[in-house]
């Protein structure tokens, strides 16, 4: 299972603080929506027709009980009581208030989760076979390889502004379940 190391912890905390400042500047009218768009997309925030949407990274689709409880807390406190899992093993909340997003990001960071690079034209997530580590037909557990790819590609300048969104799935079995 994915675990933050010291670099991840410090990086995510700094990113939460940076985005909190950017949100405050947007809400104060100091930056326009056009100026804010690339900043919010780098932090998993979309502006949809009626509300903001937040996409949360779930590396290789694995969550522990603390993370699931935090997602439930976020759904109840900041959204309408539920979220949506995507086909690429991320989770989306469709109704958070922009002013609440920094608090949501801080809550996520407390359980080793984030929204960095979950939207925009970048490598959005590195997923794995949903039976990774437990499948009888698995030749190799794909999660260490998925983690290497995640670390290598996260915030990499060559992969931050691709012409289109890009998603990677890794499997360790002959038959592709990813």
Image (cartoon, grey):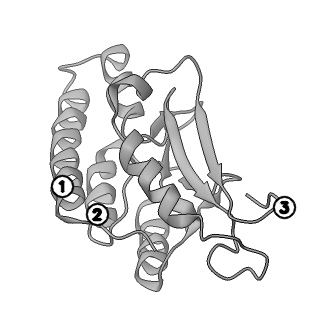
Describe the element under mark 1 as helix, strand or loop: helix
Q: Is residue 6 left or right of residue 166?
A: left
Identify the mark nearer the N-term, 2 or 1.
1
| Label 3 neighbour load within 10 Å: few <14, some 14-19, many 20+ | few
Mark 3, secondary structure of its residue: loop
Is 27 drawn above or below residue 107 in the view shown? above
Left/right placement of residue 13 relative to residue 148 reads left
Q: Which residue is nearer to you in this view: 68 or 8?
A: 8
Q: Where is residue 70 drawn, in percent x and y?
A: 41, 74
Check disc 3 and report the residue beneath it: 175
**From this viewpoint, is residue 7 visible?**
yes
Label 3 to label 1, Cα distance in Å? 39 Å
The spot of residue 15 in percent (x, y) is 21, 45
The residue that mark 2 highlights is: 109
Choose the circle earlier in sequence order: 3 or 1. 1
Question: Could you say where residue 75 lies in the image, as x and y percent from the top left?
Answer: 49, 66
- Residue at the spot 42% in from the left edge and 67% down from the top edge: 74
Name the residue rendered at 19%, 36% in the picture: 24
Of mark 3 and mark 2, the one earlier in the sequence is 2
Could you tell me if the residues under marks 2 and 1 are in contact, i.e. CB atoms within 8 Å?
A: yes
Is 114 or 1 nearer to us in this picture? 1
Q: Which residue is mark 1?
A: 13
**Which residue is located at x 40 percent, y 82 percent?**
66
């Amino acid at each position: 299972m994915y675990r933050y190391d010291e670099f991840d912890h410090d990086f995510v905390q700094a990113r939460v603080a940076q985005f909190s400042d950017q949100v405050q500047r947007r809400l104060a009218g100091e930056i326009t929506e056009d100026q804010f768009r690339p900043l919010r997309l780098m932090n998993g925030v979309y502006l949809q027709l009626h509300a903001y949407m937040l996409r949360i990274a779930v590396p290789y689709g694995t969550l522990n009980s603390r993370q699931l409880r935090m997602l439930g807390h976020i759904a109840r406190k900041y959204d309408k009581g539920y979220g949506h899992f995507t086909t690429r093993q991320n989770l989306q909340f469709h109704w958070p208030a922009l002013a609440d997003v920094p608090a949501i990001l801080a809550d996520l960071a407390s359980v080793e989760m984030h929204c960095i690079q979950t939207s925009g034209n970048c490598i959005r997530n590195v997923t794995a076979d949903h039976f990774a580590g437990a499948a009888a037909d698995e030749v190799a557990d794909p999660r260490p390889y998925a983690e290497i790819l995640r670390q290598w590609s996260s915030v990499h300048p060559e992969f931050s502004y691709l012409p289109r969104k890009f998603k990677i799935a890794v499997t360790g079995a002959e038959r592709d379940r990813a």
